[in-house]
Amino acid sequence: MKVTVLYFAHARTARGQASEALELPDATTVAALRDRLAAQLGARVPTFLLARNEAYAAPGDILTDGDEIAVIPPVSGGAVLVGPEPVDAASLVQAVQSPTQGAICLFLGTVRNEFAGQPTERLEYEAYIPMAERELDAIAREAEAAFPQSRVALYHRIGTLELEEASVGIAVSSPHRADAFAACRQVIEEIKRRAPIWKREIAPGGAEHWHEEPPR
């Protein structure tokens, strides 16, 4: 089958063209195509999202003949920090790794099956996205300032999440493990305290409630 891939911003510069047609095996997944494109784009575009036919694509989506795929690098020079796409742990790690960094700490916050002793079936996350992205960026920069030579990448998912799905991902690299662990902890605690992101617990049977969860 054949798909058309569109490149934007520095992805276009790295690839040297605005678009190209690719021949792919039948039943190719978005994840498989992303791996191929990541190898082609290399270190010049360490993190990006894929859209399929003008909508963000999930890794497990199966591509079909004639699909239009857009490679979407970080917006306005910064990372995409909040969105409905699944947390991509590998991309977060890739964004912070470097030959100078001897430790990478990865944190994933996942949906558990209870809160305060009550069963949970799924969670719904809502955010004031422009403010949330500014706050998350500030939290990352503060951690990098507090732990010199550390690098931080993070992403918070919104929308409906099922049990075991990741709602937030944080990757921190540092020359030494103590700083990587400490910076990662600082980031998640500040996200819980400051980010305008809310979650609603949905219980079996449909009962629901919004709640605040204190930092741990």
Image (cartoon, grey):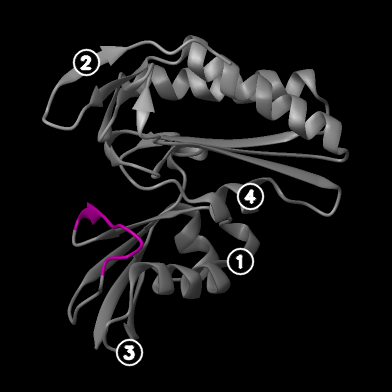
Mark 1 vs 2, N-terminal side = 1
- Which three-letter amino acid code belongs to the residue tagged 4? Val
* Residue that numbered label 2 is attached to: 209
Left or right: 140, with 126 as reference point? right
Using the image, tell me which numbered label, if any, was put on residue 93.
4
Q: Position of residue 124 (x, y in %)?
A: 25, 29
Circle 3: residue type: Pro
Pointer 3 local density, CA inside 10 Å: few below 14, some 14–19, many at least 20: few
Tell me where the magenta segment starts and ends, as one range: 54-61
**Is 9 situated above or below 108?**
below
Residue 47 shown left or right of residue 95 in the figure: left
Q: What residue does disc 1 label?
A: 42
Could you say which disc has been placed on residue 25 in the image?
3
Q: CA distance from mark 3 to mark 4?
A: 28 Å
Above or below — where is 204 with respect to 12? above
Label 1 Cα neighbours within 10 Å, binned few <14 / some 14-19 / many ≥20:
few
Q: Please name the amino acid that badge 2 sits on.
A: His
- Residue closest to the far front: 117
